[in-house]
Amino acid sequence: MKQTLLGQVAVVTGSSRGIGRAIAQRLAREGAVVVVNYRQSQEAAKVVVDTIRGQGGQAEAVSFDVSDAQAVNHAIRDIFNRHGRLDILVNNAGGTLDQLLLRLREDEWERVLRVNLTGTFLCTKAALRWMLRAHYGRIVNISSVASHLGNVGQTAYAAAKAGIEGLTRSLAREVATRNITVNVVAPGFIATDMLEQLPDVLKQAYLQLIPMGRWGKPEEVAEVVVFLVQPAAAYVTGQVIGVNGGLYM
Ligand SMILES: NC(=O)c1ccc[n+]([C@@H]2O[C@H](COP(=O)([O-])OP(=O)(O)OC[C@H]3O[C@@H](n4cnc5c(N)ncnc54)[C@H](O)[C@@H]3O)[C@@H](O)[C@H]2O)c1
């Protein structure tokens, strides 16, 4: 099969595990040179890189915290300088800190917004500079079904993810004439470490609500991301695509 992303350079934030790892592996299978970003888990990132290389793909691990502007700018510039291009950015790094609003401290609220929303802003701004020069780019931001349905204990997380969707639509308009697309993939409940953190009783309750009656797989999210970053998906921008087994429609 023809590889559709041959020679392209892709950065996937937070890709040492979970959904990010599946996206990194899938992009590599399409021929992209994949930058596996991680914050602390160097060992896990190395395993992802080794797996990709073992399958004949190209990857490297690069550490930076998406919420640290200086670190992001430095890393993205360095990636561009070494490869001479940056075609694809997937803003996947994120996390939640569940707490009822009345108990949610201001510093906790800010931490959740910082990683999910500000992190997406910082990485996008750093990468966009190079994409604008090239008159080409594909940006995919990972949101969540929580931003559409709401979720008890996730006011900060849902606000951050809804913010990502607003950012996406506005930026899509700003860069549309430059062959740069900006879209959102909004996963439902996907079987990763994040899901493991939920109490069993909550998991059972959520499962009842999913028309397909099962959790999603990271690979099923990756498949939609790969579609959106194709050169052929040039006319799809500013969209939010759910991967949620029918949980929200
Ligand atoms: N798993 C789900 O059910 C689900 C549902 C909806 C949305 N999502 C979203 O999908 C994305 C991936 O989630 P996941 O389930 O794979 O979770 P995960 O916790 O397994 O992975 C998140 C990754 O982001 C990294 N990360 C966190 N903060 C970072 C920072 N400041 N800088 C760099 N990396 C950082 C983590 O180290 C981790 O590798 C997240 O944005 C999450 O909000 C997940």
Image (spheres, grey):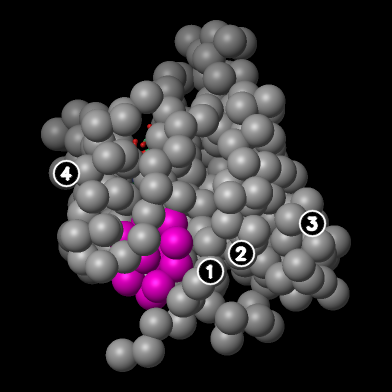
Label whose residue precedes the other's in the sequence (4 or 2): 2
Q: Which residue is mark 3?
A: 170
Q: Residues within 10 Å of mark 1 (few under 14, many from 20)?
A: some
Tag 4 residue: 204
Q: Amino acid at mark 4?
A: Gln
Q: Which residue is mark 2?
A: 87
Q: Secondary structure at mark 4?
A: helix
Kind of residue at disc 1: Gln
| Image mark for residue 8 | 1
Residue type at mark 2 is Asp
Evaluate if marks 1 and 2 touch, with contact meaning CB atoms under 8 Å apart: yes
Of residues 244 and 19, the one nearer the viewer is 19
Label 2 beta carbon less than 8 Å to ligand 1 = no
The answer to whether residue 33 is magenta is yes
Q: Residue furthest front?
A: 82
Residue bounds of the magenta highlight: 23-34
